[in-house]
Structures are given as structure tokens and as C-alpha cells.
């Protein structure tokens, strides 16, 4: 839809685009997490929505919106990337 193609896995996505500091996140940035239910290393990805929230797929809830400061995700946050056309 937006003319941007991303790799399939979170590990592959983690090297695409420009690194963004957490304090500079904008809606649409891709946020990454390590050591989640999916395994070690970068293993989960979401899309930053603004106001400290991100959208992601949950194995138990399906598509969901969560706060970056959520007690589960806050210590697992590893970084963000911005992919532009």
C-alpha cells in the first residue's frame, strides 16, 4: 500500500532503515523486543502508534495495542527503526 517492503522476520527487519532513539519515536516507526515468547534475541516487533503505544500481534490476543512501558515489554525493548520511501 505504501510502497515499502519489509523482510518477514523480526531479526531481518532489525537491520532495515534508520535507527531511532526511543525519545524520538514517531507513529509508523518499527519497535523491536528481545527474549519474548518467540525466543531469544530480537524476537518480536510492533508498529509505534504515538503516545507511548504500539500495535503488535499477540499469540493470546491476536492484534493488540500495548504501552511501551508495559511491565513485560519495557525491559525487553531493544530499539526502533524508521523505514521511509
Image: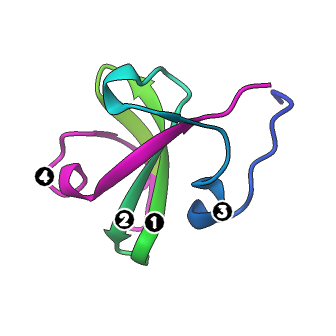
Marks 3 and 2, Cα distance to the nearest angstrom? 13 Å
| Image position, residue 1 (x, y; %) | 83, 30
Q: Secondary structure at mark 2?
A: strand
Determine contact: label 1, label 2, CB under 8 Å.
yes
Q: Give, as a single range, the part of the protein colored magenta.
A: 57-85
Furthest-left residue in this view: 71
| In-image side of 16 versus 43 (left or right) | right
From the image, tell me which residue sits under label 3. Answer: 12
Q: Residue at x 57, y 61 (%)?
A: 10
Above/below status of 49 relative to 19: above
Q: Is residue 1 magenta?
A: no
Question: Whole-Å distance between the Cαs marked 1 and 3?
Answer: 9 Å
Residue 7 x/y as whole percent:
74, 57
Rendered residue at 18%/40% (across/down): 69
Tell which circle, 1 or 2, labels the residue nearer the N-terminal end: 2
12 or 57: nearer the viewer: 12
Q: Residue beneath label 1, please?
A: 42
Amino acid at each position: 500500500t505504501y510502497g515499502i517492503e519489509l523482510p518477514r522476520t523480526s531479526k531481518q527487519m532489525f537491520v532495515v532503515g534508520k535507527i531511532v532513539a526511543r525519545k524520538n519515536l514517531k507513529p509508523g516507526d518499527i519497535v523491536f523486543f528481545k527474549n519474548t515468547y518467540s525466543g531469544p534475541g530480537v524476537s518480536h516487533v510492533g508498529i509505534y502508534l504515538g503516545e507511548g503505544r504500539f500495535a503488535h500481534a499477540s499469540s493470546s490476543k491476536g492484534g493488540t495495542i500495548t504501552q511501551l512501558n508495559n511491565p513485560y515489554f519495557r525491559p525487553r525493548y531493544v530499539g526502533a527503526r524508521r523505514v521511509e520511501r
